[in-house]
Amino acid sequence: MSQNKVPILDLKPQYQAIQTEIKAAVNRVLESGQFILGEEVGNFESAAAAYLGSKHAIGVNSGTDALMIALRALGVEPGDEVITTPFSFFATAESISNVGAKPIFVDIDAASFNLNPEQIRDQITDKTKAILPVHLFGNPAAMAQILDIAEAHNLKVLEDCAQSFGSAYKGDCIGCDGGCQDDVRNSITGQRTGAIGDAGAFSFFPTKNLGAYGDGGLITTNDDAVAELARKLRIHGTLKRYHNEMLGYNSRLDAIQAAILGVKLPYVDKWNQQRRQVADTYNRLLENVPGIVTPAVTAGHVFHQYTLRILNGKRDAVKEYLASQGIGAMVYYPVPQDCLPVYQGQFPTYPVSEQVAKEVLSLPMWPELEEAIQERIVATLKDAIAL
C-alpha cells in the first residue's frame, strides 16, 4: 500500500500472514489433479457446516448462484412473490427474477440498513412464497420477527449472507417491544447467520469476510430434501451422470477455491473480531462529530463494511474530498434495487431506502487496519464535513 494512499480495502496483509498455508493448499490440489468438486470441496463443506451450525453446506460457483439455487430448492417457482429489501446489491433481486418469481420490496430500518419486519405483513399475498432478508454490511437482520411472520403465513425464509460470514444473531429486534415470540428469539440467539432460516446463501467473492481468490458461494440448510435438490441443481439437475432429472446449472465450487477457503476458515473469528475493533475505533474517533451518523457496534455485527450516514446533502462532496486526499471510500449502494433501470417504474417508493442511498458512505475497512491510519482518515473526514 502506498504511504500516501489509503484504499477502501487492502487484502495484502491477510495474504502475507497465511501465504505459506495458502501455497501448500494450492499445490496440494495441483498435485492431486482433482479440480472440480472432490475431496477438497467435500472437506470444506463439512468444515463450513460445522462452523455455521448447519446440517448441510453445498458449495457453488458464486453467491448469486447460491441465491438462485436455494430459491429453487425451497420451491420458489415462476409467478411466486418473494419479499426482500430494496437496499442491497442487485444480485438479491436479480436472483428472484431469474427464477421467474417477482421481488416484492419492503423498506428498511435506517439504523440497521436491514429489512424492516414491521412492514412485511402488509405485503403478503396469496402469491407470496418466501422472505429473503439480507444481513447487510455484516449486521444480522431481525430474524426473530421475520421467522414469526414466516411461520404464521407458511413462508420460507432464505437468508442472504453474502456479507455476514461468521456473524451471529443476538436478539436485536427492530422496534421490538415483545411482539415476537420469546421462545423463537431465545431459540435462535447465538446462532450464526445462514443457519437460522430455511436456507442461507453465502458469497466468497475475494472482498468478503471469508473470501476466496476468485468466485465461490455456499448454500446452507438443515433440510435434507432442500440439500439434495440444491446438489442436483448445481450439476445440471442430476446426482447421477447422464440421468438429468431437471433443468439445473453448471455451478460447482472448484477445488482450488475450496482449499483456499479451508485454510482461511479457522481465522475468520479472529478477523471478524479485528473488524469490530476497527469499527469501535472509528466510532470513538467520530464521537460527537456533527453531520454524521455512525453505525452501532452491536453484538453480532461483523462489519463487512463500516458505513456512515453523511447528513445535510454533503455525502458526495465528502467522498470527493477524501479521494482528493488519497483516501478511498465507497457508496454501497447509490441506487436502491427498485430504482435500477431494469425495475424502474414497477414499484412504489421506499422513502427510507431512497434517503439512506443519498447519505451512506463506507470508510476503509479490513482486519489489519492500523489505528494511526484510521486517525488520518477521520481527521480528513472532519475537514471535509467542515468545508
Image: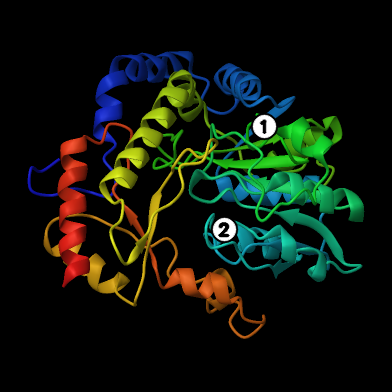
* Model colouring: rainbow
Q: Is residue 199 visible?
A: yes
Q: Between 326 and 39, which is closer to the camera in this rendering?
A: 326
Q: Is residue 221 visible?
A: no
Instruction: Please tell me whether mark 2 sits on a helix, a strand or a loop.
Output: helix
Say if 97 sits above or below 141 in the image. below
Quarter of the C terminus within the rendering: bottom left
Instruction: Please tell me whether mark 1 sits on a helix, a strand or a loop.
Output: strand
Q: Residue at x 69, y 61 (%)?
A: 96
Q: Position of residue 295 (x, y in %)?
A: 43, 51
Q: What amino acid does circle 2 point to? A: Ala
Residue with the mark numbered 2: 91
Q: Position of residue 93 (x, y in %)?
A: 63, 63
Sequence-wise, the earlier of marks 1 and 2 is 1
Q: Position of residue 39 (x, y in %)?
A: 59, 16
Q: Between 382 and 302, which is closer to the camera in this rendering?
A: 382
Q: Which mark is residue 58?
A: 1
Q: Which mark is residue 341?
A: none
Q: Residue at x 75, y 39 (%)?
A: 230
Q: Position of residue 100 (x, y in %)?
A: 75, 65
Say if 50 sits above or below 329 in the image. above
Question: How many callouts does the rendering have?
Answer: 2
Q: Residue at x 76, y 61 (%)?
A: 82
Q: Between 177 and 378, which is closer to the camera in this rendering?
A: 177
Say if 257 sits above or below 290 in the image. above
